Image (cartoon, rainbow, N blue to C red):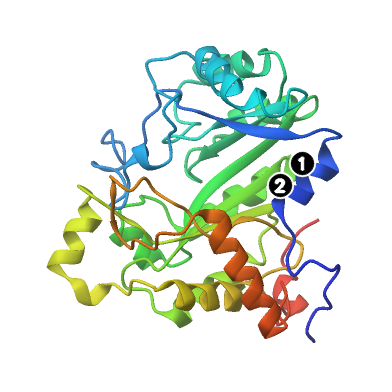
């Protein structure tokens, strides 16, 4: 049976989750801690994911020649004038932020937590880079501080994951998310909608599959082709593999995805915006908040909400 909508909101917003956790405003500060990835350094492959250019999500203050503290200082200076009472989450964002010696990782995490007004960590990583020893240490940290581990799943299709040079399987992602959940650590996931070779039916099947995972939050974004990446070159060589969504078409895709999604998940975003000078296609010309306004208007027109067609039996393997 369809799930009933839980509130006046058509979906669970990540901001609401943070408000439940913290009695004050919090802002993420992106950190580039100078890490790499196992599919960049030859451990699993070379060159990284075919779509990847980390300049697209690292703000100017997060340069890897700066220390964690320097990046926090500059990031906090940028935001603090608007909300002087705000607190901050150190967001280890660029590349794989659990891929280093344990002592090096912990040194950087604790450097962030020791910085004034930093109240927690968000750590972006890959599901094949979370050893049990590190997870045990993160569990200790989470007993005193907010911790959310954000795993890049990207697709639930192993064929797609292989074609984009991810270097891990969906099964590895599901297993690592389960291990993280068992440690009582908040767990997020990231998916890209519209990867080459994936049609609409395939994309919507991702919602069904991830809905059985014990996730706290989810980030979605449209496929963006970044200049000088292998995927941008692939578009020229094999355009038949790509379907580049127009705005209205992508909005309807997001709503169809949302309707099939587990209603317990908090949604952090549906769209991403890469710098214009790096973006090849698509160039929608919308700010993220403008996209969200259009999305919400369309959700209202359709009478839609998160989990509208979700079947709870799909989630029986989800462990509490």
Give 198 or 284, whichever is nearer the viewer: 284
Gap between marks 1 and 2, in whole Å?
5 Å
For disc 1, the neighbor class at 10 Å (few under 14, some 14 to 19, many from 20) is: some
Measured along the vertical axis of the image, is residue 74 above or below residue 170? Answer: above
Residue 184's mark? Answer: 1
Quadrant location, the N terminus: bottom right
Residue at the spot 55% in from the left edge and 13% down from the top edge: 69
Quadrant location, the C terminus: bottom right
Q: Are marks 1 and 2 in contact (CB under 8 Å)?
A: yes
Q: In what element is the residue under mark 1? A: loop
Measured along the vertical axis of the image, is residue 246 above or below residue 78? Answer: below
Q: In this view, which residue lies farthest toward the bottom?
A: 1
Q: Quadrant of residue 256?
A: bottom right
Give 319 or 205, whichever is nearer the viewer: 205
Image coordinates of residue 286 in percent, x first then y, are 46, 59
Q: In this view, which residue lies farthest toward the left?
A: 237
Position of residue 82 in the picture relative to residue 78 (left or right)? right
Position of residue 44 in the picture relative to residue 32 (left or right)? left
Q: Is residue 310 visible?
A: yes
Residue at the spot 48% in from the left edge and 43% down from the top edge: 126
Image coordinates of residue 262 in percent, x first then y, are 71, 68
Location of mark 2 (residue): 181
Residue at the spot 78% in from the left edge and 24% down from the top edge: 85
């Amino acid at each position: 049976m369809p799930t009933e909508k839980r509130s006046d909101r058509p979906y669970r917003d990540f901001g609401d989750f943070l408000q439940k956790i913290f009695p004050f405003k919090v802002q993420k500060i992106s950190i580039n801690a100078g890490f790499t990835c196992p599919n960049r350094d030859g451990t699993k492959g070379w060159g990284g994911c075919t779509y990847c250019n980390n300049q697209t999500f690292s703000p100017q203050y997060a340069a890897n020649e700066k220390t964690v503290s320097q990046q926090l200082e500059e990031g906090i200076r940028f935001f603090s004038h608007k909300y002087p009472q705000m607190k901050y989450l150190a967001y280890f964002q660029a590349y794989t932020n659990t891929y280093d010696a344990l002592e090096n990782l912990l040194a950087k995490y604790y450097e962030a937590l020791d910085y004034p007004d930093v109240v927690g960590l968000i750590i972006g990583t890959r599901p094949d880079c979370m050893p049990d020893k590190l997870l045990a240490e993160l569990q200790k940290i989470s007993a005193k501080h907010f911790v959310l581990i954000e795993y890049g799943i990207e697709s639930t299709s192993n064929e797609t994951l292989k074609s984009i040079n991810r270097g891990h399987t969906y099964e590895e992602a599901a297993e690592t998310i389960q291990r993280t959940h068992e440690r009582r650590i908040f767990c997020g996931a990231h998916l890209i909608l519209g990867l080459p070779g994936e049609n609409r039916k395939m994309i919507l099947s991702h919602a069904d599959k991830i809905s059985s995972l014990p996730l706290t939050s989810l980030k979605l974004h449209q496929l963006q082709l970044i200049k000088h990446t292998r995927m941008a070159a692939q578009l020229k060589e094999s355009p038949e593999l790509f379907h580049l969504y127009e705005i209205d078409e992508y909005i309807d895709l997001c709503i169809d995805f949302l309707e099939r999604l587990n209603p317990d998940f908090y949604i952090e975003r549906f769209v991403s915006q890469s710098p214009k000078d790096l973006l090849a296609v698509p160039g929608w010309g919308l700010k993220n908040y403008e996209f969200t306004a259009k999305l919400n208007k369309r959700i209202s027109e359709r009478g839609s909400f998160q989990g509208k067609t979700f079947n709870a039996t799909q989630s029986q393997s989800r462990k509490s």
